[in-house]
Structure formats: C-alpha cells, structure tokens
C-alpha cells in the first residue's frame, strides 16, 4: 500500500513540476503516473550504478556532478516515454531539482512506517 502512495505522490510532484518549469510537460495524469513509476525505477536501479561509475568526476567537482547526473536521468526518462517531454538540459536540471524538493516535501504526508501500532 505504501509503494502505491509513494508513486501517487511522485505523480503529483511531477505534475506540479510541469506547472512551474516551462520545458517539462506531461500529457495526462496517467502519463504522470507512468513517468513517476519509471523515474522511481531509474533512481533505484540505474542511478546507483552511474554514481559508482562517475565517482572520480563527482569527487573532482565536489559532488556537483550529481546534479548533472540527475538532470540526464530526468531528461532520459522524458525521451523514453511518449506522454512525458523534457525540452532540454536546463529544463531537465531545474525539473529534476524541483521534482526532488517537491517529492521530499510531499513525503511528509505519508504515514510513518516505524510508528508503533497499538
């Protein structure tokens, strides 16, 4: 149940990003939901591998390359899915940063999974 709530919050966060960042568009709510699912899988499976592979560049840039990596993954998902478009690199950069911040803020709406049940 919690994973479904996380995906719904991801779709809401992505839809809010499309309202703020001009180069990021989503055709429908279903496209936002599918894009949120794909973004979560990419961030879970692909991103850790790329972080390890680009570790020297990340160290030299003092971690700033992680923003570039996030933008490239966001842009890549936008180019894979037909209902989710990202116009260019700068739209991807601002969209990825804003998506992370909005998703983080919305995650406080989820019930605490470590709370004791009576």
Image (cartoon, grey):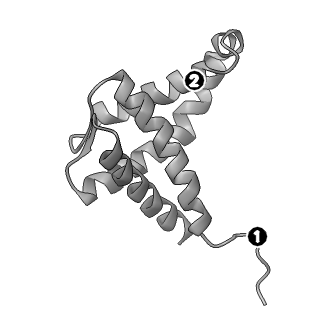
Asked if the residue under mark 1 is in contact with the one under mark 2, i.e. CB atoms within 8 Å, the reply is no
Residue at figure coordinates x 39%, y 56% from the top left: 11
Which x, y percent locates residue 100? Answer: 53, 44
Tag in front: 2 or 1: 1
x 62%, y 24%: residue: 51
Res. 7 mark: none
Mark 2 — residue? 50
Query: Closest to the observer: 50 or 78?
Result: 78
> Mark 2: few, some, or many residues within 10 Å (few <14, many ≥20)?
few
The relative height of residue 44 versus residue 102 in the rendered view (above or below) is above
Q: Decide which of tag 2 and tag 1 comes sooner along the chain.
A: 2
Label 1 CA crowd tier, 10 Å (few <14, some 14–19, many 20+): few
Residue depicted at 56% across the width and 32% down the height? 47
Label 1: which secondary element: loop
Q: Residue furthest bottom?
A: 118
Residue 111 x %, y %: 63, 73
Determine whether the residue tagged by mark 2 lies in a helix, strand or loop. Answer: helix
Specify the quadrant of the image occupied by residue 116: bottom right
Residue at 45% in and 55% down: 10
Task: Say above or below: 59 vs 27.
Answer: above
Where 100 sits versus 11, above or below? above
Asked which quadrant contains residue 108, the reply is bottom right
Residue 25, position in %: x, y? Answer: 25, 42
Whole-Å distance between the Cαs marked 2 and 1? 30 Å
Which quadrant would the C terminus be assigned to in this image?
bottom right
Left or right: where 57 falls relative to 39 = right
Report the residue marked by disc 1.
114
Q: How many marks?
A: 2
């Amino acid at each position: 149940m919690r994973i479904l709530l996380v995906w719904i919050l991801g779709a809401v966060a992505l839809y809010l990003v499309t309202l703020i960042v001009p180069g990021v568009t989503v055709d429908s709510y279903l496209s936002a939901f599918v894009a949120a699912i794909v973004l979560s899988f990419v961030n879970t499976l692909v991103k850790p591998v790329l972080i390890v592979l680009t570790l020297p560049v990340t160290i030299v840039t003092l971690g700033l390359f992680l923003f570039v990596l996030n933008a490239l993954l966001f842009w890549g998902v936008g180019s894979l899915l037909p209902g989710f478009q990202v116009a260019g690199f700068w739209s991807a950069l601002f969209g990825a940063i804003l998506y992370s911040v909005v998703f983080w803020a919305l995650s406080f709406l989820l019930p605490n999974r470590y709370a004791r049940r009576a």
